[in-house]
Image: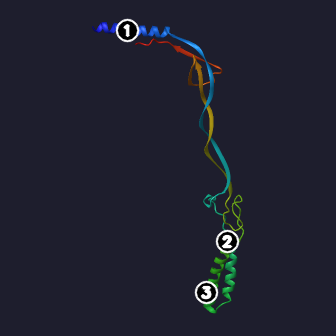
Amino acid sequence: MQRLTQLTLASLFATALFGAQAATFTDNARVRSAEPQYENINVPRNECTSQWINEPVSAAPQTTPARQYGGAVLGGLAGGVLGHQVGNGRGKDAATVLGVVLGAVAGNQIQNQYGQTPYDNGQYASNGRYQPAQREVQRCRTVYDVESRINGYRVTYDYRGQQYTTLTRNNPGSSLPVRVSVEPIEQ
């Protein structure tokens, strides 16, 4: 019984395959219209801008300008002379020592704050403070441009008095090859 069922199924399959192959052919249909179908695509690109920025103070060179001691020496001498003019006896000696110390401190401050210090590649101004340098920085970002592209054609065609619509990759022109299949209708 099982073997009979298998033979029956195999013969039905072979008949259907032979029948479908014998009743299939190609023909040409007349194209009525072919409308392009568009698809929007995001296309990435880099957009770069350049700007000049000031280097932060933390980017200053690690070397410090050379200290100058001439102001301290001159301030100490001037302070000593002025201190010697004040007081008598032991008070005169104390005023001279105090004048030397205060004069040295004041002279040092004046010279190192307002005096000339060496330049370090143009980064230090005459007052000894770091002047920020400028440098160019380029920043880039990705932007997306929308681009329309044809991804196929909606083709309307006539075949034997019937109108059909399909999608094709290319524009078929004035005619479209079609595959025709004929099958009997069982009643």
Q: Secondary structure at mark 1?
A: helix
Q: Name the amino acid type tagged 3.
A: Ala
Task: State the residue position of label 1.
Answer: 10
Q: Nearer the viewer, mark 2 or mark 3?
A: 2
Viewer-proximal residue among 12 and 127: 12
Task: State the residue position of label 3.
Answer: 94
Spatial separation of the CA atoms under disc 1 and disc 3: 130 Å
Q: Secondary structure at mark 3?
A: helix
Determine whether 98 is above or below 15 in the image.
Answer: below
Q: Quadrant of the C terminus?
A: top left
Outermost residue toward the bottom in this view: 88
| Mark 3, other Cα within 10 Å: few <14 / some 14–19 / many ≥20 | some
- Provide residue 136's location: percent of width, then percent of height: 68, 52
Q: Name the amino acid type tagged 2.
A: Gln
Viewer-proximal residue among 105 and 166: 166
| Mark 2, other Cα within 10 Å: few <14 / some 14–19 / many ≥20 | some
Viewer-proximal residue among 182 and 93: 182
Q: Secondary structure at mark 2?
A: helix
